[in-house]
Image (cartoon, coloured by chain):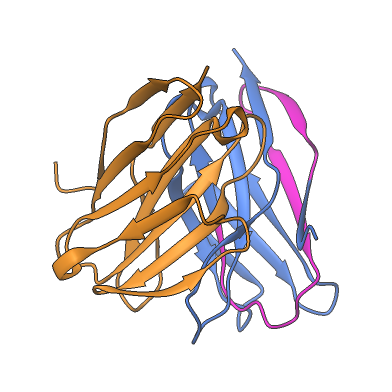
Amino acid sequence: QQQVKQSPQSLIVQKGGISIINCAYENTAFDYFPWYQQFPGKGPALLIAIRPDVSEKKEGRFTISFNKSAKQFSLHIMDSQPGDSATYFCAASISGSARQLTFGSGTQLTVLP
Amino acid sequence: DTGVSQDPRHKITKRGQNVTFRCDPISEHNRLYWYRQTLGQGPEFLTYFQNEAQLEKSRLLSNRFSAERPKGSFSTLEIQRTEQGDSAMYLCASSTAKGEQYFGPGTRLTVT
């Protein structure tokens, strides 16, 4: 059962543009939502995370928007750069448990120079 | 470098052989996780340790898989009688009780 659905599967953006990746979840017990960036041959690296008590969190060029009623959250990358080209994964977990992460299927982002 | 480390980075083995991977977490992290990632997919949870206790195992973890974390420090993941379907990237992550998980570089297993 896929509990976190991610779209699009791939995304091509021009340098300086905005990249938007969306995720939807099913389990209302999820209360922690991180985004990870992964380069080929490397492990995922934590980018930014949000908890459902806020609707938006911004760190530098990266912003998470969270809609609890719709059970959706999204990652916005402002002023996208070629160095941002990577695979991005959304994830979710439940506090008070083992906190294992349930990942989306990933979005391969390509930023053209 | 004080991040999560994994060894080996790559392992090629023949079907039916046993393999063992090692993970060294960030030193102050008491939680340790193993995930498996196949090509084009997100990581999938395998098992979780809090200190030396293995507290959770996924249904993905067949009885050919065993994991240990003696003394609550490094962890090992062993796969017995490997199958071609075991070919994947095996990722280790660690965290404090706060829950932010930091991943190692992974061990890529190829079963021929």
Give me the residue at 62% from left, 68% from top.
Answer: A56
Give the blue chain's letter.
Answer: A
Chain B: its colour in the image is: orange
Residue B4 makes an appearance in the image: no
Where residue B8 sits, quadrant-wise, is top left
Camera-nearest residue between B91 and B28: B91
- Residue B58 in the image: x percent, y percent? 57, 64
Residue at the top extreme?
A: A113
Q: Is residue B41 left or right of residue A96?
A: right
- Residue A106 in the image: x percent, y percent? 67, 41
Give me the residue at 61% from left, 84% from top.
Answer: A53
| Residues rendered magenta in the picture | A7-34
Q: Is residue A71 left or right of residue B81?
A: right
Camera-nearest residue between B57 and A14: B57
Residue A39 makes an appearance in the image: yes
Q: Is residue A12 magenta?
A: yes
Give me the residue at 56% from left, 55% from top.
Answer: B62
Residue at the bottom extreme?
A: A96
- Residue A102 in the image: x percent, y percent? 62, 61
Q: Is residue B59 magenta?
A: no
Residue at the right extreme?
A: A70
Where B97 sits versus A74, above or below? below
Give me the residue at 18% from left, 65% from top.
Answer: B70
